[in-house]
Image (cartoon, rainbow, N blue to C red):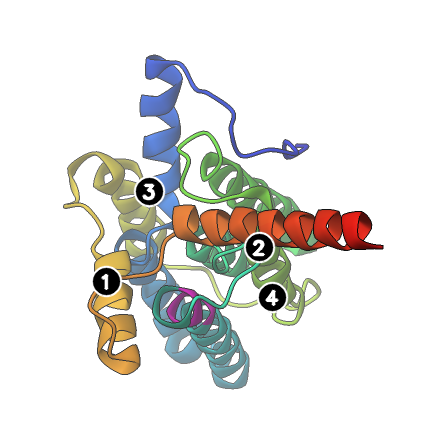
């Protein structure tokens, strides 16, 4: 699925509702319980403790990097107007770092081919969640691409296709599928961005968060200043 060059794509109201539901599948409040359930089974049911630690550890590292980029921008205006970049997309990162391995665990007793199909499906879900950040106007393409790169790296460093294990108990896929089907409709709104904003302001000492609009306004002023300097130099030369 190709991502558009610009984040200014306009979604019709019905499409916007659909993409808003899809994008919720990347929220930590919804996806994290499923990941922890799968990790619990992988560690204690399938006796794959080392693999579990690698998966959760890489997700933690990716989440730290993602949060750090957001804090750097909100608190210290560290972004790129040229790339329209204000921080890594957490939804894109978390979805692509979680779903491939999540479906791998759910299908680990079905053999390598079933696992491959599950992993491909997991990446497809992650890409869909990542794309949803564009029509919902939550992120720019550069931020989505960064999240995809980070999340896919986590999955590629974690998934072990040839490995199999015991049959997954019915409650694990049942709880996972029910949760992912119902929570996007009924779970309370995510407050992760509010938390990151509060942390950014506390660390930077600023009273107001830096915004994307301010970043582009500064860039326009900088370009205007360069144009004035160039014209002045040309006239006096």
For the residue carrying disc 2, how many other residues have a C-alpha within 10 Å: few (<14), some (14-19), or many (20+)? few
**Residue 110 in view in this figure:** no
Mark 2 against mark 3, which lies toward the viewer? 2
Q: Secondary structure at mark 1?
A: loop
Foreground residue among 4 and 170: 4
For the residue carrying disc 4, how many other residues have a C-alpha within 10 Å: few (<14), some (14-19), or many (20+)? some
Q: In the rendered structure, are the residues bearing label 4 and label 1 in contact, judged by CB atoms less than 8 Å apart? A: no
Foreground residue among 154 and 115: 154
Mark 4 or 1, nearer chain start: 4
Write the start and end of the magenta stretch as one range: 69-73
User: Alpha carbon of mark 2 to alpha carbon of mark 1: how far?
Assistant: 22 Å
Q: Main secondary structure of the magenta part?
A: helix
Say the numbered circle drawn on residue 208: 1
User: Alpha carbon of mark 2 to alpha carbon of mark 4: how far?
Assistant: 57 Å
Residue visible at 61% across and 70% down? 158
Mark 4 against mark 3, which lies toward the viewer? 3
Foreground residue among 78 and 130: 78
Name the image quarter holding the C terminus.
Answer: bottom right
Q: Secondary structure at mark 2?
A: helix
Mark 2 or 4, nearer chain start: 4
Q: Is residue 144 above or below residue 72?
A: above
For the residue carrying disc 3, how many other residues have a C-alpha within 10 Å: few (<14), some (14-19), or many (20+)? many
């Amino acid at each position: 699925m190709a991502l558009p060059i610009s984040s200014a794509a306009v979604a019709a109201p019905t499409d916007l509702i659909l993409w808003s539901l899809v994008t919720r599948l990347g929220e930590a409040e919804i996806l994290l319980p499923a990941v922890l359930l799968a990790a619990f089974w992988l560690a204690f049911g399938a006796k794959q403790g080392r693999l579990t630690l690698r998966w959760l550890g890489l997700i933690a590292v990716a989440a730290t990097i993602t949060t750090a980029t957001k804090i750097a921008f909100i608190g210290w205006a560290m972004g790129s107007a040229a790339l329209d970049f204000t921080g890594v997309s957490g939804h894109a990162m978390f979805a692509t770092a979680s779903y491939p391995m999540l479906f791998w665990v759910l299908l680990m007793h079905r053999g390598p081919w079933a696992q491959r199909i599950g992993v491909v499906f997991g990446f497809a879900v992650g890409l869909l969640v990542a794309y949803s950040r564009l029509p919902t106007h939550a992120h720019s393409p550069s931020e989505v691409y960064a999240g995809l790169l980070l999340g896919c790296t986590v999955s590629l460093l974690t998934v072990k296709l040839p490995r199999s294990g015991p049959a997954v108990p019915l409650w694990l896929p049942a709880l996972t599928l029910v949760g992912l089907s119902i929570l996007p409709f009924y779970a309370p709104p995510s407050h992760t961005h509010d938390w990151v904003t509060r942390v950014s302001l506390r660390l930077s000492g600023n009273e107001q968060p830096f915004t994307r609009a301010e970043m582009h306004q500064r860039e326009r002023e900088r370009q205007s200043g360069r144009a004035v300097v160039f014209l002045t130099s040309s006239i006096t030369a």
